[in-house]
Amino acid sequence: MATITAKMAEWAASVRYEELPTEVVREAKRYLMDSVGCALGGAQQHDVHIAREGLGECAGDGAATVLVTGESWDPSRRRCSMR
């Protein structure tokens, strides 16, 4: 029996934009814009600067671009232990 996650993944992989109801597309766009706004606002917080500094040391240079700062990290490579 397929798991609920497998069923959701199958649906997500096969759905076409044209098949989505207008309301779903509108809400998805709202959610995306809200997330970007939260990221932009949150990136300026002091604790985020501290976290970025520590995580940047562990992740090092890579192909993943950090939103807002433009830093490039490799989150799959850990150079230090997270305590």
Image (cartoon, grey):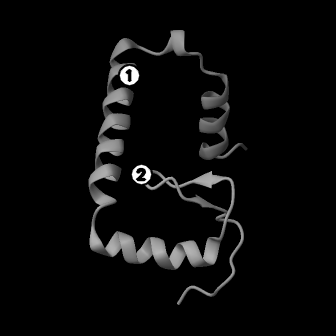
Note whether 53 is above or below 7 in the view shown.
Answer: below
Q: Is residue 8 left or right of residue 34?
A: right
Amino acid at the residue labelled 1? Val
- SS at badge 1: helix
Q: Position of residue 47 (x, y in %)?
A: 32, 75
The circle on residue 79 is none
Q: Is residue 55 left or right of residue 47?
A: right
Q: Residue furthest top?
A: 18
Determine the residue positioned at 38% across, 22% down. 24
Amino acid at the residue labelled 2? Val
Determine the residue positioned at 67% across, 65% down. 61
Note whether 22 is above or below 48 in the view shown.
Answer: above
The circle on residue 68 is 2
The circle on residue 24 is 1
Dot 2 crowding, Cα within 10 Å, few <14, some 14–19, many 20+ = few
- SS at badge 2: loop
Determine the residue positioned at 62% across, 28% down. 11
For the N terminus, the image quarter is: top right
